[in-house]
Amino acid sequence: MKVGFRPYRLIETDPYHAKEVAFVKVFNKEMEYNKNFIHQIISSENGFYLSEREETIVLSVIQWLGTPVGQGFLEEVNKLTNKQAINAKTV
């Protein structure tokens, strides 16, 4: 399993880190299913591939999204997009 820069936070038995573990597991599952998954997300169509360090950076961001701070970020994004969807319906 590929992980970001903070693998010590991936404690499966600790509920505080459960979402971090889940984000990393699901992302890794996608990478196993489609070997070019990470490159398709980040890369351009000109055959550019990420270095190992760049992959680790991407995995660190994915892991961060599972942290309480990352979850707060996602909540704010959801609130904003839900508000925009409601506003679009009333126009």
Image (cartoon, rainbow, N blue to C red):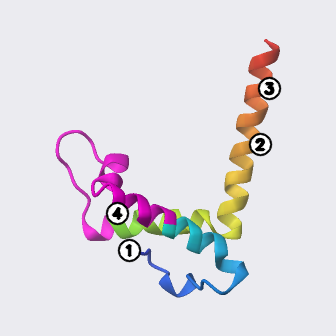
Q: Are marks 1 and 4 in contact (CB under 8 Å)?
A: no
Q: Residues within 10 Å of mark 4 (few under 14, many from 20)?
A: few
Residue 49 on the magenta span: yes
Q: Between marks 1 and 4, how big is the CA–CA gap?
A: 10 Å
Residue with the mark numbered 3: 86
Looking at marks 1 and 3 on the same chain, the residue that comes earlier in the sequence is marked by 1
- Discs 1/2, front: 1
Q: In the image, what residue occupies the spot 77% across and 42% down?
A: 79
Residue 23 in which image quadrant: bottom right
Closer-to-camera residue (32/76)? 32
Q: Which element is circle 4 on?
A: helix
Question: Residue 20: horizontal and vertical position, in percent?
Answer: 59, 72
Label 1 vs 4, first from the N-terminus: 1
In this rendering, the label closer to the viewer, 1 or 4: 4
- Residue 2's label in the rendered image is 1
Q: CA distance from mark 3 to mark 2?
A: 11 Å
Q: Residues within 10 Å of mark 1 (few under 14, many from 20)?
A: few
Residue 39 in the image: state x and y as whole percent: 30, 52
Look at label 3 and name its amino acid: Ile
Q: Is residue 74 above or below residue 22?
A: above
Q: Amino acid at mark 1?
A: Lys
Residue that numbered label 2 is attached to: 79
User: What is the x, y in percent for residue 32?
Assistant: 34, 63
Q: State the residue at coordinates (57%, 74%).
A: 21
Q: Which residues are magenta?
A: 26-54
